[in-house]
């Protein structure tokens, strides 16, 4: 195996295309873990290729791989709302009367999740980032109106990261609304305009509509399919929290989460 590295051509073949790909990743703001995965997969495959075929064939394959990866990063099939791959926090403007819906999936095969769902000492809260009218906005879980944001509100933070409109809302909702469903549908509706935080990173999201925007006339739009391979995601998280144990700051102890 080590004899492969004795040729100067081998070093060029191994590392020049790899450096080009990593350089492209840098300008497309890809998640750091992708760098590690690329190196771990690319280098062993190229070493194996060099052992099996001649230099020219290996070079052609390396160029094809590099070219396809560069094209996929720099020319995505669909546009991202932020024009970048990975966004820490941005805001989506929702008009009054529109409904925003986001789905969360409960894999029943996960024994840890099942254990949290079945435990009577575990409750559920929803984290939302944005700027929402507390009194007039209502939260729906699986189609049921469970109350206004002000009624469900446990806490509302000061503006996060010194960004205006980046308020962190913590809402408590009944766990029995989600225990018997494979999908948790969270909807938010308000008669006034509001802002919701969102991200569009590389999280492995399901290939079905999971973020919808419904208009007062009944027409709805699949937001996630419009922006960059369904990587659009509102900054909502369902947390499973202890009803018994508290953290040092007297906050409910978080036992699990669904993004």
Image (cartoon, rainbow, N blue to C red):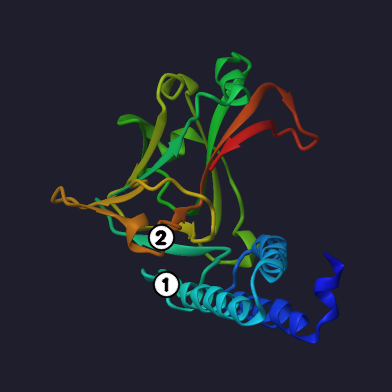
- Answer with left or right where residue 36 lies relative to residue 8: left
User: Residue 26 appears at what percent x and percent y?
Assistant: 64, 77
Choose top left, top right, bottom left or bottom right for residue 104: top left
Vertical arrangement, residue 117 with respect to residue 102, above or below = above
Lower sequence index among marks 2 and 1? 1
User: Residue 12 appears at what percent x and percent y?
Assistant: 73, 84
Structural distance between the alpha carbons of marks 2 and 1: 9 Å
Q: In percent of the image, x 72 and y 62: which residue is there?
A: 44
Q: Secondary structure at mark 1?
A: loop
Q: Are marks 2 and 1 in contact (CB under 8 Å)?
A: yes
Vertical arrangement, residue 19 with respect to residue 97, above or below = below
User: Residue 61 appears at what percent x and percent y?
Assistant: 56, 75
Q: In percent of the image, x 59 and y 78: which residue is there?
A: 57
Choose top left, top right, bottom left or bottom right for residue 125: top right
Give the number of the disc on residue 229: 2
Q: Nearer the viewer, residue 248 or 256?
A: 256
Choose top left, top right, bottom left or bottom right for residue 176: top left
Q: Nearer the viewer, residue 102 or 210?
A: 210
Q: Which residue is mark 1?
A: 76
Question: What crowding class fits label 1: few (fewer than 14 Cα within 10 Å), some (14-19), or many (20 or more)?
Answer: few
- Answer with left or right where residue 3 lies relative to residue 200: right
Question: What crowding class fits label 2: few (fewer than 14 Cα within 10 Å), some (14-19), or many (20 or more)?
Answer: some
């Amino acid at each position: 195996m080590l004899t492969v590295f004795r040729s100067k051509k081998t070093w060029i073949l191994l590392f020049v295309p790899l450096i080009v790909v990593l350089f492209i990743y840098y300008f497309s703001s890809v998640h750091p873990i992708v760098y590690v995965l690329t190196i771990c997969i690319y280098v062993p495959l190229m070493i194996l290729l060099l052992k099996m075929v001649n230099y020219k064939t290996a070079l052609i394959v390396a160029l094809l791989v590099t070219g396809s990866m560069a094209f996929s990063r720099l020319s995505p099939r669909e546009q991202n709302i932020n024009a970048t791959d990975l966004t820490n926090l941005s805001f989506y403007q929702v008009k009054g009367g529109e409904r925003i819906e986001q789905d969360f999936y409960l894999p029943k095969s996960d024994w840890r999740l099942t254990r949290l769902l079945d435990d009577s000492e575990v409750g559920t809260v929803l984290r939302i980032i944005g700027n929402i009218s507390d009194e007039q906005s209502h939260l729906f879980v699986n189609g049921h109106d469970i109350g206004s944001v002000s009624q469900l509100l446990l806490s509302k933070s000061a503006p996060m990261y010194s960004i205006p409109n980046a308020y962190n809302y913590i809402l408590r909702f009944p766990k029995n609304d989600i225990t018997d469903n494979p999908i948790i549908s969270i909807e938010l509706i308000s008669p006034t305009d509001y802002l919701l935080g969102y991200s569009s990173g590389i999280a492995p999201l399901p290939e079905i509509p999971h973020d919808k925007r419904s208009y007062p006339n009944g027409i709805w739009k699949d937001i996630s399919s419009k922006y960059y391979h369904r990587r659009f995601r509102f900054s909502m998280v369902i947390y499973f929290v202890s009803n018994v144990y508290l953290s040092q700051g007297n906050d409910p102890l978080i036992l699990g989460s669904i993004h």
